[in-house]
Image (cartoon, grey):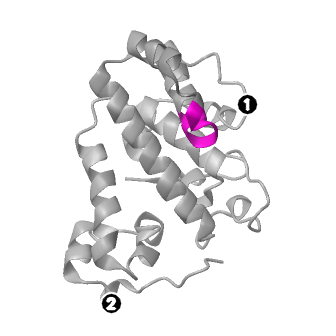
Amino acid sequence: MSRLSFVPTDKWPQELRDFVQADRASEIELGITRMLAHAPKAALGPLQFGAALGVNRTLPERLIELLRLRIAFHNQCRSCMAIRYSAAEGSFDEATACALEQPEIPSTLSKPERLAIELGDRFATQHLTIDGGFFEQLKAQFTEAEIIELLMHCALYVGMGRLAAVLDMTENLPNGFSKPFGESVKLSDDKPFTVS
């Protein structure tokens, strides 16, 4: 059960309600915003950051969704692990998603995808290993603008995913993703939700 209460959407300032389209979103789509609403003006910062990355994305949806899921697994963010975004729907199957819980990066992924997953691994677990040599590998597959985009996605997913994990936000999730805090969860533990 979440460590902080959810703020009912009718108590949110109109600016926050409008930004997340609270009147049209499901509980699962409102996600962490239900707790961020305790500090609504500050909440707009990370929400706008995430929205800007989504609207201005240049990298393939599939690559970003695979990166997001890998970092969600590292963070043990249950809500992040239980969601699949419809924008990437059909670009990979659930077996591919679940393979991301294994230490080895799936060999079925493209070279840029494997490198992006490795970046996510390092960013989430050993960020100081992202050295000059690794940047040279990134530059062989991505433009500098794409590398910055990847790094911003990593920052969003590591930061907000850890925030959601610490808040133990598991209400409304499939049972397999609702194990007690501290117990490891796998991407394959239950059937995920698809959201827009």
Q: What x and y, as percent, mark residue 54?
A: 30, 45
- Foreground of the two, 184 or 86: 184
Q: Quadrant of residue 140?
A: top left
Is 104 inside the magenta-drawn segment? no
Earlier residue among tags 1 and 2: 2
Q: Amino acid at mark 2?
A: Lys
Structural distance between the alpha carbons of marks 1 and 2: 43 Å
**Magenta span: chief secondary structure:** helix
Which residue is labeled 2 in the image?
11
Residue 52 left/right relative to 114: left
CB of mark 1 within 8 Å of CB of mark 2?
Answer: no
> From which residue to which does the magenta span run?
120-128
Give neighbour class at mark 2: few <14, some 14-19, many 20+ (Cα, 10 Å): few
Could you tell me which residue is drawn at 71 percent across and 45 percent down?
188
What residue sits 35% from the left and 83% below the top?
9
Residue identifier under label 1: 103
Q: Who is closer to the viewer here, 99 or 92?
A: 99
- Would you place residue 87 above or below residue 51 in this image? above
At label 1, the amino acid type is Pro
